[in-house]
Amino acid sequence: SPSAPPPRSVERPLDRTDPGLESKPPRTTRKSKPPEPSATPASVEGQFTADNAGIAEKPSSRRGGIVTAPATGRTQKFPDIPDYEIQSELGRGGMGIVYKARHKKLGRLVALKMISSASQASEADFIRFLNEARSLARLQHSNIVQIYEVSEFEGQPFFSLELVEGGSLSKQMTGQPWDPDTAVAMIEKLARAVHFAHQHGIIHRDLKPGNVLLTPDGEPKLTDFGLAKNLQDTERQTNTGAVMGTPVYMAPEQARGEGHAIGTHTDVYALGVMLYELLIGEPPFTGPTAMALLYSVLEKEPQPPRRRNRRIPRDLETVCLKCLQKEPLARYSSAIELADELARFRRGEPIKARPVGAVGRLVKWARRRPALAAVYFLTLLLLTLGGLAAGAVSLWLNAEQARDQARAAHVETQSALLRVEEAKKVADAALVRVALEKTRAEDAQRREAQANQNLAQANNNLALVNYLHNVELAQRDFYQGDILRALQSLASCPQPMRSWEWHLLQRHIRERGYYLGAHPGELRILRHSPDGRFLLSGSSNREVRVWDAAANKLLYTYPGHQSDVYAVAVHPDGTQFLSAGWDRKIKLRELATGKELRTLEQHTAGIMSATFDREGKRIVSSDTSGTVLIWDLAGNSPPIKLAHAKRVDCAVFSPDGTLVATVSDDQKVRLWEADTGKLKFTMPGHTLEVYAVTFNPRGDRLLTGSRDNTLRIWDVSAGKELKVLRGHVNTVFGVDWSPDGKMIASASADLTVKLWDPESGRELYSYRVHDEVARSVQFSPDGTRVMSGGYDGQIFVWNVPGPVRSTELKTNRFQTCKDLDANGSRVAAGYREGNASVFDAGTGELLSSTQSTHNGAIGCIAFAPIGDRFVTGGDDGRVKVWDANNGRELLSVEGHASPVKAVAFSADGKRVAS
């Protein structure tokens, strides 16, 4: 089922017919001075307010007509601009001056901006001035200052702007921390305004509190686009090496003058600096000079906000620090992604960003100092391996000692060789001394070679530990269902080091499933042919692709649509298929050739779903306007129309073709008679938009998925809700029922695909193989595989696991570990309190509990392969063996200096490894 369409924005150019804008052609044409060499401005001016730093108290004289106005007992002179009555000066900067003025004809107050000294302005000043006007004219947004008129008077350009009289954000920032919720609300609004500018191809490049104006009720307005970069204007791209912006709020790529690297992530960095300053009371980096400040921006890591203010929530600190990453790709990729993340924080929902821990910060430091950090960085990785920590320290000391020895030996070698050369100049009387120095040099060379050999060995040992750590991480992710991260960890292992454990884990992952291929663009829909031979996919790149499901290869690529393809389906006879999308057309084509057979065109809005009935004689389709059409392919009668008030994301036939089920953005599920179009049931239950629906094979149950993160099962005959399945943490976009009706599958925006038991409603499996929204899911016709597709364009094929028996242990205590005995009849569970229990695996009933405890939590547990014993390992470093029948302690041994993480019996049950 499709997702909600992207938001639309409309660019409103300056237009003389718009009553809200006054647009005049320039009165004169002036010759500008030749462009001056680019400099490194500390800042640029926007619409100034009286509290802006660097604003002069008195206005300077201007060319052209002058009018006077009273100003505190003295006469103040202002330019005489036709149609405007200038009332006061708001502020000025290095290039521009801003007046408060009244438009005489319209009678409204405006801010009038002009170049402060046109006779001394350079070509670059005029370009920046007009660049700001062009940028503002393209942006009509509630949180961006609006432009009314652009004109010129006596060779001096000017433009009028929306007057914002609440002062700048910098005036409100007194050096004291803001309340976190207030700060989040402010930056979220600014981020959405910045995203709007990005959508129109404009990068601000000088975001800072001084360029944010506030209305009297505190609403922010973004201004000063003088340094904005127009991504569509190739004639005015910033030269590499030109540093533009304000140092405190510059991103590292901006500070380095890398004009080609400036993008949406540059503005995200500046928003992060502003968020940091609101939370702490000062920016992340300061310095006595601009160069010192730029060095900090490029080389230092910001101090975590919670070290300065413990009231800041940990998730908000994570969001802030992600914005301030040195590498652009490590930040949020867009301002809207940051805004949505802040919205999730504000609503109390989990955020997507992960905090950068000590290892992450060390990796970033190592990238900036690769030569110095090579050994130290690999050594620190050992600290993540728990039980290998002591070995890590030893390897680090050996590497450090080897390095020192190598340096000392090298210095001694060079010194000795110099002395040898001097000795050669001495007469025969110095021959003994020469021989002695030569011996010393050779000895030093041997020590240097040995030291280098020791260093190489230490580096090899560290590389081995790092390899084993990556394999361990891959294994953990695999068992937790995160197939994507497991494959990434395996891919990071160097090819020469891959041994049996790497290949074994790789084989296990391939047995679970594999990637079929990639579809360019965001994948919207996956559908099998009835015989299971073919798999069809549609995506945002307007193509339909046909895959050989058995041979796992791409067969055909069929273009033809003018917009995103949201629906594909194969005719029951397997010879033709349909496709539909946002171009409002349903196309019927031959499967083998792609030849177009017929086009159905009666939808007036983008089509969200379309499918055949079981006999292939009818099609049901839905669109964003709320219209559902049932087409009779055999006759010439017009389609039956099922009207809805809001968008219909999915419509399907029942297996026998007598009913049609629809789901809509009005949060309701509806059942209709397919032959007459008569509404049979309207079923409320979901609390947000419903995106997916399907019947079970018998046709007596419905399954739906919604933006409220739930799946729901409905009784078709009664029109009643039966079950609510919870487990996803984001929108459910795709659902399907297995051919035997014993399992259901779901795909979600939380990046996971889940398999469920429809009878109990229990979640059976959860996998992550997509790094973007999991959009569509379908069982193969034989029920042995599940195909999923996502916005990352990837198609993944799952091998459906066998039947699962699910038993709930009858205890409400937190279990730290569990193990099943050899015949599967009993389960042993360990607890944080240090004791353990044995349960019946079939009923979940408690059978026995241990009579004594570990001094700390139990971290691992294992049954003996024969007999009635099990072993536990605890945080107290002890290993204990217990009688499973009565919980009596049989053996307790010590030997570990740290918590025990794994225990196991030998095959004969006579020995224990820990």
Image (cartoon, rainbow, N blue to C red):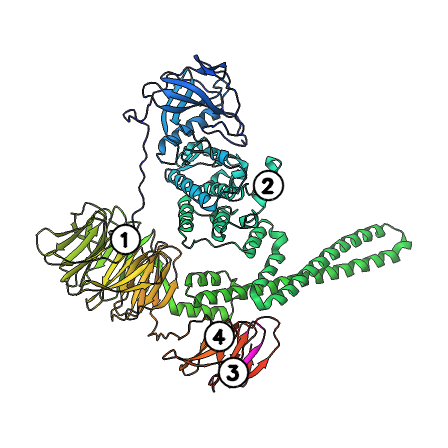
Between the residue at mark 3 and the residue at mark 4, the CA separation in whole angstroms equals 12 Å
Q: Is residue 377 left or right of residue 812?
A: right
Q: Secondary structure at mark 1?
A: loop
Q: Nearer the viewer, mark 1 or mark 4?
A: 4
Q: Residue at x 60, y 52 (%)?
A: 370
Residue 155 is drawn in which quadrant? top left
Q: Amino acid at mark 2?
A: Tyr
Between the residue at mark 3 and the residue at mark 2, the CA separation in whole angstroms equals 62 Å
- Magenta region: 874-884
> Of the numbered discs in the image, which one, if any, rests on residue 451?
none
Indicate which disc, 2 or 1, sits on the residue closer to the N terminus. 2
Q: Amino acid at mark 1?
A: Glu
Front-lying residue, 489 or 760: 760
Q: Residue at x 27, y 53 (%)?
A: 689
> Of the numbered discs in the image, which one, if any, rests on residue 830?
4
Q: Amino acid at mark 4?
A: Gly
Q: Secondary structure at mark 3?
A: strand
Residue that label 1 marks: 689
Q: Is residue 844 above or below residue 152?
A: below
In the picture, which quadrant includes the C terminus? bottom right
Q: Do residues under tags 1 and 3 come within 8 Å of each other at their CB atoms?
A: no
Residue that label 3 marks: 882
Indicate which disc, 3 or 2, sits on the residue closer to the N terminus. 2
Residue neighbourhood size for the residue with mark 4, other residues' Cα within 10 Å, grouped as few (<14), some (14–19), many (≥20): many
Indicate which disc, 4 or 2, sits on the residue closer to the N terminus. 2
Q: Do residues under tags 1 and 4 come within 8 Å of each other at their CB atoms?
A: no
Name of the residue lying farthest toward the right: 429
Front-lying residue, 589 or 403: 403
Q: In the image, residue 559 lies at what x, y percent?
A: 26, 50
Q: Nearer the viewer, mark 3 or mark 2?
A: 3
Q: Do residues under tags 2 and 1 come within 8 Å of each other at their CB atoms?
A: no
Q: Do residues under tags 4 and 2 come within 8 Å of each other at their CB atoms?
A: no
